[in-house]
Amino acid sequence: MNQTQTYTIKGMHCASCASIIEKTFRKLPGVNSVEVNYATETAKVTHGVHVDRARLSKSIEPLGYSLAQTAEEMGMSPEEHAGHLGLNQTKEEKLAELKAMRTKVVISLPLAVVAALNMVLGIVPNSLLWLMATVMLFWVGQPYLMGFWRFLRYGAANMDTLIGIGTSAAYLYSAIVSVFALQLKTYLDVTGTYWDAAIVVIAFITLGKYLEARSKLKTGDAIEKLLTLQAKVALAVRDGKEVEVPIADIVQGDMIVVKPAGKIPVDGVIAEGSSFVDESMLTGEPIPVEKNIGDTVVGGTLNTTGAFTFRATNVGGDTMLAHIINMVAEAQGSRAPIQALADKISSVFVPIVLVLAFLALGAWLLIGGAYLGFAQALSLGLASFVGILVIACPCALGLATPTAIIVGVGKGAKEGILIKDAATLQKLAQVDIVVLDKTGTLTQGRPEVTALNNYSKLTDDQILAIAAALESKSEHPIAHAVVGHANARKLALPSVDRFEALNGKGLKGLVDGVEYYAGNLKLLRDLGLVADAQAVAAGTEAGNTPVFLATKDTILALILVADALKENAKDAINKLHAMRVRVMMLTGDDKRTAAHIARLAGIDEVAAEVLPEDKLTTIKKLQTEGRVVAMAGDGVNDAPALAQADVGIAMATGTDVAIETAGIALLYGDLGKLVKAVSLSKLTMRGIKQNLFWAFIYNIVGIPLAGGLFYPLLGWAISPVFAGAAMALSSVSVISNSLRIKAKTL
Ligand code: ADP
Ligand code: MG
C-alpha cells in the first residue's frame, strides 16, 4: 500500500539541493516517488508504509539537511502544530537566518569594495589581501566550503560545491604564489594572485543570496495573510453566559456570539440576529453580504455593524479557511509540468559544469600555454575555471518556475480564486474554449415565476400548491422559484409520497393518491402528451423556462419561470472573446430559452436540452477535436462534466462551495472572476517563460564567455568577479520578475 506524505525540509539553500535530496530519498528501499520543491522547502514522498521519517531524515543528514519535526514528535495536537508551524514559526526562523546573512553582507561589502579598488589601483599589500580573503572564504563563504567538503566526502555536488571549489582554487593558487613568490617569479614568471577575485565573488554571491532569501519570503506572504485571518478566541455561550474561549476549545454545535466589528471565529449558521458581513478577505468581493437567520457565515470574515449568534458547524481543521490555507499551500508546493525541463537540466548541470571547468583549465594550459607561455595560460585558465564554476550555478533555473507559481497562486487566493495545483494553472493558460453551464453560472440562479397558464379545472392556487409541494423536494433552482412563489401567496402545501427526480427532465410524486409530473418538454414527450406549441414558443422565446404540471394523461398547467442574466456576464464574455477564447453555453434547458439567454450574453455557441450525462459527452467531443476545455458550473449536478474538462471551474455563490472538488474554485462565483482566473494563469505562465529564458541565457552565454572561448578571436574573457555578479543578478532578476506578477492588475 502506498501513501504520500509531505515533509518540511530544513537546510536547503539552493535549487540543486532539491535534486540531491530527491536522489538520496529515491535510493531508499520502499520509496516510490519523490518531489522536492526548493521554493517551498518541502518534499512530497510516496512510499510503502514501512518507510519511517527517521530513516528519511537520517539519509540526508550527512548532506546537511533534515526533516522538520511533526506534530507527534513535538507532542502537539494537529491544530497546535499547525498554529505553531503556521509558517509563523518557520518565518521567525527565516527572519533570523536573514539577519545572519545580512551581517555577513554588511561585513563583506566594504572588503569587496577595497578589493575591487585594488584591482585598478594595486595599492593594498598582499598580506592584507590574504587576511581579507581568509575572512571571506572561511567565515562568509563557509557554506561553500561545506559544499566542497560534502562533494569530497559524499560525492554530492550542488551549487555551493561549485562556488566552494572555484573560490578555494583561487585562494589556494594565490597562497602558493604568495609563499613561493621568489621561486615562482624566477622560474615560471608567475606573479598574479586572485585574492581580490575570491573576495569579490564571495561578496557578490552572498549579497545575491541575501536578496534572494529576502524576496523569497515576500513571494510566500499570501498564506501568511490567510493565517492572520484566523481568530484566536471566540465568544461562546456556556451555561447561558458569554465567555471568551480559545479557538481550539470551540466544538461543533457551540453557540457563538459576534459583536459589531467582531471577527467570525469559525464556520456556522446564524441562529439569531442579522448583519452585513465583510467577506472580502476570502472572496475579494468588496461589498459586505447581508446575513440573516439560517445563512452561513465563514470563519475569518469580519462582521460590520449588526450583531448575531451562530451555531458552529465547522471547527478546527474543517473550516473553510483551514481548507483554503491547505489548498493554497499544496498548490504553491506543487510542481508545474513546465518545470520538468528545468529540473532535468539542473540535476545534470553540476557534474557537467565541473567537467567543463576542468576541460577549460586543461585547454588553457595545453593550447594557451603554447602561445602565451605557461604563467599567463595558468593565470587565465584559472580565471576561466573559477568563472565557469561561479557563473554556471543553476540557481536561477531552479527558482524560475516555483517562485512564479507561488506568487500566482497566492495572488489568486487574495481574489477568491482558489487553484488546486500548478498543473491546473498551467493548463488554464492553454484553454481555448470555456464551456459555461447556464443556470447559476450565466444566470443569477434565482429564477422567478413569471406566468401561469392553467389548462385545468383546478384553481391557480391549487395548481401552484401541488407544483410547489412536488418541487419542495427538489434542489433545482427552478424548484426554488416555484416554491418561493407559492410561499409568497401563503399557500399550504399538501404532502407528497413516492417522490422521484427525473434527471434532466423534472420530477414526479403522489399527491392525494394522484400521480403528478412536473418538468419540461422532454418529460411530456415521454408521457406522450402534446403541449400548446404557441404558448411554449411565446414563453421560451422571451427567455422563460417552461415547467409543465401534468398527470399521466393530461397537461394541467404551464408555469413559466425566468432567470435573469448575471449583470457582468456580457462583459466577461466579451473579455474572453478578446483573449481569443471560445465560449459555449451548455444547458439542460429548452433550446429557445437557451438561445434567448445566449443572445443577451453575446454567446454564439449553444448546446441546449442536454441531459446531465450528455454534458460529459459534449466536453469529450470538444477534446477529441483537439480543444483544451475549461468547464464552469455550480459543481452540483455538473460534477462529471467538471471532472472531464481539462480544467473544471466550480462557481460558488458566496463562499458556499466544496473547494476541493474542482481544479479551480471561484468564491463568489461571478464570471468576472473567471476572466481574472484566465488572465492570472496567462500572466503566471508568461512570467515563468521569461524566468526560464533569463535563467538559461545567463548560463548559455556565461559559460563560454567565462571559459574564454571568445578570447582567441575577440580578446573577451570575463573575470570571475563579473561571473559572481552575473550569477547573483540572475537569481535576483528571476525572483523580482516573479514578484512583478503580484503587482499586475488582472
Ligand atoms: P441545467 O442545470 O442546465 O438547468 P439540468 O439537467 O439540471 O440542467 O436540468 C435540465 C432541465 O430539466 C431544466 O432546464 C428543466 O427544464 C428540467 N428540470 C430539472 N429539474 C427540474 C425541476 N425540479 N422542476 C422542473 N423542471 C426541472
Ligand atoms: Mg445545473
Image (cartoon, rainbow, N blue to C red):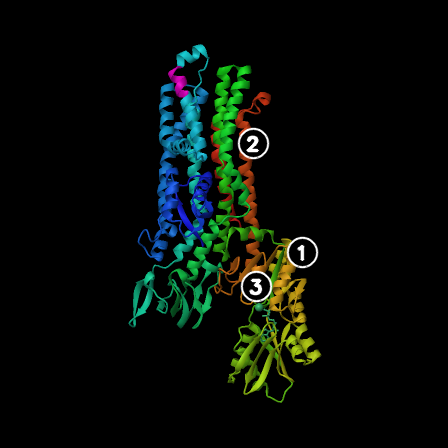
Give residue 744's position: percent from left, percent from top: 53, 49
Q: Which residues are magenta?
A: 174-180
Q: Which residue is mark 1?
A: 625
The residue that mark 3 highlights is 640
Q: If you read the primary sequence from the N terminus, does the residue marked by circle 2 or circle 1 appear first?
A: 1
Mark 2 residue crowding within 10 angstroms, few (<14) / some (14–19) / many (20+):
few
User: Are dots 2 and 3 in contact, CB under 8 Å?
Assistant: no
Q: Magenta stretch mostly in which secondary structure?
A: helix
Quadrant of the rendered image containing residue 561: bottom right
Cβ of mark 1 under 8 A from ligand 1:
no
Amino acid type at circle 3 is Pro
Residue visible at 65% across and 77% down in the picture:
526
Q: Looking at the picture, which amino acid does disc 2 mark?
A: Val
**Left or right, 137 with reference to 595:** left
Q: Earlier in the sequence, mark 2 or mark 3?
A: 3
Residue 701 shows which numbered tag? 2
Tell me: residue 530, above or below residue 44: below
Measured as percent of width and height from the top left, residue 41 is found at: 43, 45
Mark 3: is the Cβ under 8 angstroms from ligand 1? no
Q: Residue at x 43, y 56 (%)?
A: 325
Label 1 vs 3, first from the N-terminus: 1
Which quadrant would the N terminus be assigned to in this image?
Answer: bottom left
What x and y, as percent, mark residue 96?
35, 42
